[in-house]
Image (spheres, grey):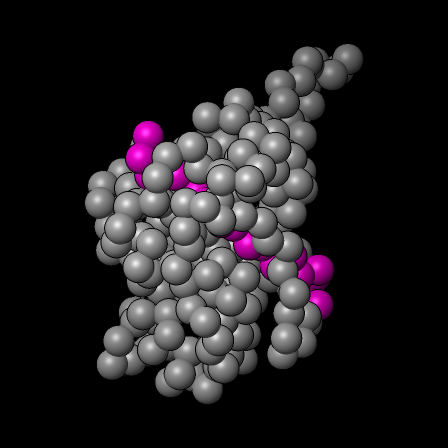
């Protein structure tokens, strides 16, 4: 999967043909309602991508254009054998064990299914640079060039458009009336993130946030899978 535009030869009349847009990347001028969404969460062995910081669980809820998965969405999810031990602080947060992960498939085996889930979609995540930074690291390690898939970050939206007592995932959910289950497992966090985004959308869309470009401008940042953002390259706090 590539985020590069395909070069073309000049047309017969001497005028260049406009390059084809990469179909794996949504058009920012399109309305959000016309685009598929992919709500993403990863659990990791540590807080920073690297030899000891690997993805150990991933979940993606793909929502078709204009779709609504309902109050109990069922995302695609899988454990992943990280190839390194869980750091104690990570194990305390996600509750996973090295024994549980030992028989899981490696990232290379699940990458094709993951890329199908993300293809052509807008990523929705809470603290998107965290998830995107780890996914970029894993995809590159598995021999895949990450596409410039854009992300809407519910954490950035919470900071810019709300005044919550805390912007952590669980606290935002509770203040918006979104049910929470066992947080810090990928499938559960995806369901909560979708609920948060749906509530935010109800408020913000009538204020003019209809196109993807408008949402990205409203959050004040444009993280993508190809360029996760400044925070992805350093130790960041998991929310």
Please indicate, yes or no, whether residue 201 appears anywhere in the rendered image: no
Vertical side of 131 occupied by 160: above or below = below
Asked whether, in this view, residue 145 is left or right of residue 169, the answer is right
Vertical side of 160 occupied by 199: above or below = below
Q: Residue at x 77, y 13 (%)?
A: 12
Query: Image quadrant of residue 94?
Result: bottom left
Q: How many marks?
A: 0
Q: Residue at x 26, y 54 (%)?
A: 89
The residue positioned farthest toward the left in the image shown: 235
Q: Position of residue 93 (x, y in %)?
A: 33, 60
Q: Foreground: 11 or 153?
A: 153
The residue positioned farthest toward the front in the image shown: 99
Please indicate, yes or no, whether residue 104 appears anywhere in the rendered image: yes
Q: Position of residue 187 (x, y in %)?
A: 54, 61
Q: Quadrant of the N terminus?
A: top right
Q: Quadrant of the C terminus?
A: bottom left
Query: Image quadrant of residue 174?
Result: bottom left
Please tell me whether residue 49 belongs to the stretch shown in magenta: no
Q: Position of residue 176 (x, y in %)?
A: 43, 84
Asked whether, in this view, residue 213 is left or right of residue 19, the answer is left
The residue positioned farthest toward the right in the image shown: 12
Vertical side of 192 occupied by 5: above or below = above
Q: Foreground: 236 or 227?
A: 236
Magenta residues (range): 51-67
Asked whether, in this view, residue 90 is left or right of residue 111, the answer is left
Q: Position of residue 91 (x, y in %)?
A: 33, 54
Q: Residue at x 22, y 45 (%)?
A: 235
Q: Residue at x 56, y 30 (%)?
A: 108
Query: Image quadrant of residue 111?
Result: top right
Q: Foreground: 162 or 236?
A: 236
């Amino acid at each position: 999967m590539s985020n590069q535009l395909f070069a073309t030869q000049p047309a017969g009349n001497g005028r260049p043909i406009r390059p084809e847009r990469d179909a794996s990347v949504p058009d920012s001028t399109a309305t959000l309602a016309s685009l598929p969404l992919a709500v993403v969460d990863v659990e990791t062995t540590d807080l920073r991508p690297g030899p000891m910081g690997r993805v150990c669980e991933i979940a993606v809820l793909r929502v078709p254009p204009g779709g609504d998965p309902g109050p109990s969405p069922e995302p695609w999810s899988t454990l992943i054998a990280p190839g390194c031990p869980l750091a104690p602080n990570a194990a305390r947060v996600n509750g996973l064990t090295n024994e549980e992960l030992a028989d899981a498939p490696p990232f290379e085996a699940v990458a094709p299914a993951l890329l199908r889930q993300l293809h052509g979609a807008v990523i929705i995540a809470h603290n998107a640079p965290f998830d995107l930074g780890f996914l970029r690291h894993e995809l590159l390690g598995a021999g895949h060039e990450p596409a410039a898939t854009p992300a809407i970050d519910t954490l950035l939206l919470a900071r810019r458009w709300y005044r919550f007592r805390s912007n952590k995932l669980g606290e935002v959910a509770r203040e918006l009336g979104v049910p929470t289950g066992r947080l810090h497992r990928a499938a559960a966090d995806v369901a909560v993130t979708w609920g948060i985004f749906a509530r935010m959308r109800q408020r913000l869309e009538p204020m003019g946030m209809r196109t993807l470009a408008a949402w990205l401008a409203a959050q004040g940042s444009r993280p993508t899978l190809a360029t996760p953002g400044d925070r992805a390259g350093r130790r960041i706090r998991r929310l």
